[in-house]
Image (tube, helix red, strand yellow):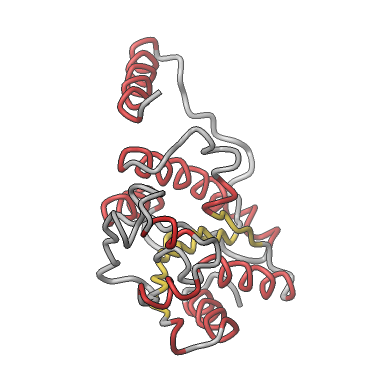
Amino acid sequence: MTSQERGSVRGLLLAKGDEDNNIVWHEGHVDRSRREALLDQKGVVIWFTGLSGSGKSTIAFTVEHALAARSRLAYVLDGDNIRHGLNADLGFTAGDREENIRRIGEVARLFADAGFITLSSFVSPYKADRDNIRALLGSGDFLEVFVNTPLELCEQRDPKGLYKKARAGQIPNFTGVSDRYEAPVDPELEIHTADCTVAQAAQQVLDLLASRGKIW
């Protein structure tokens, strides 16, 4: 099924739900503030964006480990891991990338509502898609972290050999090579991995969480 077909199906389902009035949001008896009180933290989504090989996931998992050491509950939503299950049906066309990020945004919103510190690590190359997630989550729940690593350094690292394949024409629509990356204009945090260690990068994220009152 193409992304256009999926969009048509979603539209039909939503329209039918509105028509029949069978889809109604069900409020529970435990609200978000109660869940956050149980966890002694505030739910939030840290959205790591950057080129493949920029260090997004490495930083995210390091932050998760540091938070666990502080008895804080965090979870990493990693791009490759998600494509093994939830988004296994999606490719890398512009439409599929949009749907990939839309789904993750919905999952991240649920995690934040549950009180989790959610660390989402996705190339998410298109500004409009990231802006849509920011709008979905609302003010204060979406903290964009731009992992700003030069393309040349990403290619030198190339931990999965993807750039080599992309340069050889074996991977179409590859961000930074045959597809564009739209850098964030005003992220909450910009990390220059060429100038810091992973530990220093993770500390910048922890400082951001503290400054926004998500951890203490």
Q: Residue at x 46, y 75 (%)?
A: 156
Residue farthest to the bottom? 195
Q: Does the image show residue 141?
A: no
Residue farthest to the front? 168
Q: Is 198 positioned to the left or the right of 73 in the image?
A: left
The image shows residue 197 at horizontal and vertical percentages of 55, 86
The image shows residue 15 at horizontal and vertical percentages of 32, 17
Q: How many marks?
A: 0
Q: Is 97 positioned to the left or the right of 112 in the image?
A: left
Q: Residue at x 40, y 14 (%)?
A: 21
The image shows residue 62 at horizontal and vertical percentages of 63, 73
Residue nearest the observer in this picture, 19 or 144: 144
Residue nearest the observer in this picture, 90 or 130: 90
Q: Is residue 71 above or below residue 194?
A: above
Q: Does the image show residue 117?
A: yes
Q: Residue at x 37, y 39 (%)?
A: 96
Residue nearest the observer in this picture, 37 or 94: 94
Q: Is residue 28 above or below residue 23?
A: below
Q: Residue at x 51, y 50 (%)?
A: 108
Residue nearest the observer in this picture, 130 or 110: 130
Q: Is 151 positioned to the left or the right of 56 in the image?
A: left
- In which quadrant will I find the N terminus? top left
- In which quadrant will I find the C terminus? bottom right
The image shows residue 7 at horizontal and vertical percentages of 33, 27
Q: Is residue 191 above or below residue 80?
A: below
Residue farthest to the top? 20
Q: Is residue 58 above or below residue 169?
A: below
